[in-house]
C-alpha cells in the first residue's frame, strides 16, 4: 500500500538524500568549533563550520554538536579536553566558508584569533563564544555527537545579527 501526501504525491523514500533535501529547508545558525592541537603541535589548532550546535541543558550548562569522523578536525576533537564554540554574525560569511573548506589553512590571515581559556583557540569578532569541557562523544552513524559543559565564554563578544545557513547557502536575517 502506498501512502500519499495531502497533495497526492507519493512520499520520497527514506535515506541520506531525503535527509539532505529536507534539512536544506531548515534554517540553522552557523557556528565554528575550534580545538587546540596536541601538545606536540599546539601551534596547529583545528576548527570547522557547524550548523548542528544545540543547547542541551541549562543545569549543568551543556551544548552539543556533530562532527564527521572523516573530518580533518576529528582526530584532534576526538582527543581534546576542551573545545571552543563561536556564534558567527552575518558579516562573517567568508569566515564560515573558510572553516568549511577542506584543505584550507583556517587559522592563517585574515582569520583573527587568540588562545583563550584552557588553551582553546578563540576567534575574534564573533557574536559570542564559549569554551566547553568535553564530557561525551557519542557514536551516531558516520558522525560523533560531542557534548561539552560550558566553563567560560563571552555572550556579547560582538554586536550584530546571526549568520544563517539555508538551502545550501549562508544567509542573513531580513527585516
Image (cartoon, rainbow, N blue to C red):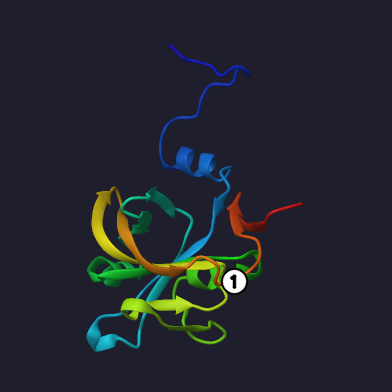
- Total marks placed: 1
> Which residue does the numbered mark 1 point to in the structure image?
158
Q: Quadrant of residue 70?
A: bottom left
What kind of element bears circle 1?
Answer: loop
Tell me if mark 1 has few (under 14), some (14-19) or many (20+) residues whose alpha carbon lies within 10 angstroms of its own.
some
Q: Quadrant of residue 125?
A: bottom right
x, y percent for residue 151: 34, 66
Q: Residue at x 52, y 67 (%)?
A: 128
Image height of 18 relative to 115, above or below = above
Q: Camera-side residue: 55 or 39?
A: 55
Q: Residue furthest top?
A: 1
Position of the N terminus by quadrant = top left
x, y percent for residue 63: 37, 55
Left or right position of 57 against 52: left
x, y percent for residue 13: 45, 30
Image height of 22 relative to 31, above or below = above
Left or right position of 112 against 151: right
Q: Camera-side residue: 14 or 44?
A: 44
Q: Residue furthest right?
A: 175
Q: Residue at x 48, y 15 (%)?
A: 3
Q: Residue at x 37, y 50 (%)?
A: 58
Q: Camera-side residue: 97 or 64?
A: 64
Q: Residue at x 34, y 69 (%)?
A: 83
Amino acid at each position: 500500500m502506498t501512502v500519499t501526501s495531502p497533495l497526492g504525491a507519493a512520499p520520497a523514500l527514506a535515506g541520506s538524500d531525503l535527509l539532505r533535501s529536507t534539512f536544506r529547508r531548515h534554517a540553522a545558525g552557523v557556528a565554528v568549533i575550534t580545538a587546540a592541537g596536541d601538545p606536540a603541535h599546539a601551534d596547529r589548532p583545528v576548527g570547522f563550520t557547524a550548523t548542528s550546535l544545540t543547547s542541551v541543558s541549562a543545569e549543568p550548562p551543556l551544548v552539543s554538536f556533530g562532527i564527521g569522523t572523516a573530518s580533518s578536525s576529528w582526530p584532534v576533537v576526538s582527543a581534546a579536553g576542551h573545545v571552543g564554540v563561536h556564534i558567527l554574525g552575518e558579516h562573517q560569511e567568508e569566515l564560515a566558508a573558510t572553516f568549511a573548506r577542506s584543505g584550507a589553512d583556517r587559522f592563517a590571515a585574515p582569520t583573527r584569533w587568540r588562545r583563550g581559556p584552557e588553551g582553546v583557540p578563540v576567534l575574534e569578532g564573533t557574536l559570542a563564544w564559549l569554551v566547553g569541557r568535553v564530557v561525551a562523544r557519542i557514536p551516531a552513524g558516520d558522525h560523533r555527537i560531542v557534548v561539552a559543559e560550558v566553563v567560560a565564554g563571552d555572550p556579547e563578544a560582538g554586536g550584530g545579527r546571526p549568520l544563517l545557513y539555508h538551502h545550501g547557502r549562508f544567509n542573513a536575517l531580513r527585516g
